[in-house]
Amino acid sequence: MERYHSRDDELPCPEWHAPWRLYRVISGDLGRVTSIAFDPSNSWFCTGAADRTVKIWDVGTGRIKHTLTGGHTGQVRGLAVSKQHTYMFSAGDDKQVKCWDLEQNKVIRSYHGHLSGVYCLALHPTVDILLTGGGDSVCRVWDIRSDKQIYVLSGHGGTVCSLLTRPTDPHVITGSHDTTIKFWDLRNEGRPMATLTHHKKSVRALAMNPTESRTFVSAGADKNIKKFILPGGQFSHNMLSQQKATVNAAAVNEEGLMATGGDDGSLWFWDWKSGHNFQQTRTTAQPGSLESEAGIYALSYDMTGSRLVTCEADKTIKMWKQVEGATPEAYPLNYNPPTDVRRRF
């Protein structure tokens, strides 16, 4: 049960969570691994890499099922798997956005329009549209059933490198190298609704709790992870620690566990409601890799939230799970309430 402090401006005390450990390292890519998406059935996941391929892996065994080639001539930066169709979507440095038919394992549709590399990609949760963000500073909205571009969401002054989609206002949230976060209204021709200017450097990652849609977090090169309240975008608080590295990726599971990955290989785990960082670990570059290749580019929980997969600069994919039999006595919470929980900077 949640316990709240007496003052209204303070955060709830964090819940205890078991720590996480590495249990599998998957090799097979010839370049750094930069994107990931899980199949809705949770039987497989796909990854995109700098070797221009998309690989499909078995969740249970970690073994490769398929390697999809010929779709991209550059690094694959974004992936998404449809819940309604047998489609997977990919985007890359080659300015290309592709729709793959997973029954045939081939590209059936291409979406042309980006003027530079495409860095992020997401499917709308309720409507058959695809959203992509790129180095041309715009987010493009596509009809997935055709190659038609519906809207161009323009207004950022730098690469759009992260995005979220929602069934209600704001329908789209984008983060950019221009340090801002923008809200967009798809019901009103994709017009901007708000601009958040709380970050000092590029916004690399956006994440939302799958069990509630009232808040989201943003993170990036300024090393701050910030939480905002929807639908208006009011600033709530900074997470109660700084990761000391550019945060490239963030994900939240249904238990309220957030994981963030840094470009120095740091992997931190957080209690979503309180912002408490309860575990700090670091990935190790594989033999033959440089120490500088211990970086995390993307990460995702599986559909159950019991596995975490990280995509890394040393060309590997790493799988994590919670320590079995862990207890609060063996792994104490070590929580010291901050004097100023909002830390408005």
Image (cartoon, rainbow, N blue to C red):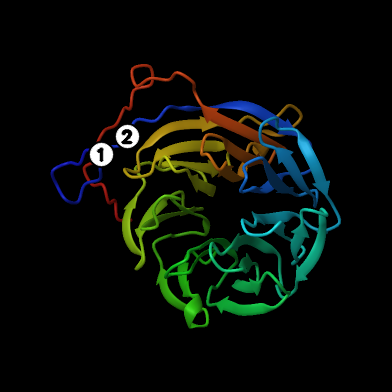
SS type, badge 2:
loop
Q: Crowding at label 2, few (<14), some or many (≥20) Cα neighbours within 10 Å? A: some
Tag 1 residue: 2
Residue at (36%, 63%) from the top-left corner?
230
Of the numbered discs 1 and 2, the one sitting upstream in the chain is 1
The x and y percentages for residue 138 are: 60, 73
| 153 with respect to 329 (left or right) | right
123 to 21, vertically: above or below: below
Count of numbered labels shown in the rendering: 2
Q: Residue furthest left?
A: 6
| 34 with respect to 249 (left or right) | right
The x and y percentages for residue 109 are: 78, 67
Residues under numbered marks 1 and 2 in contact, where contact means CB atoms less than 8 Å apart? yes
Q: Nearer the viewer, residue 341 or 120?
A: 120
Residue at (55%, 32%) from the top-left corner?
282
Q: Is residue 288 visible?
A: yes
Give the residue type that dot 1 points to.
Glu
Q: CA distance from mark 1 to mark 2?
A: 7 Å
The x and y percentages for residue 184 are: 48, 73
On-image quarter of the N terminus: top left
Q: Which dot marks residue 15?
A: 2
SS type, badge 1:
loop
| 35 with respect to 50 (left or right) | left
Give the residue type that dot 2 points to.
Glu
Residue at (32%, 60%) from the top-left corner?
235
The x and y percentages for residue 32 are: 72, 44
On-image quarter of the C terminus: bottom left
Q: Crowding at label 1, few (<14), some or many (≥20) Cα neighbours within 10 Å? A: few
Q: Is residue 29 visible?
A: no
| 109 with respect to 187 (left or right) | right
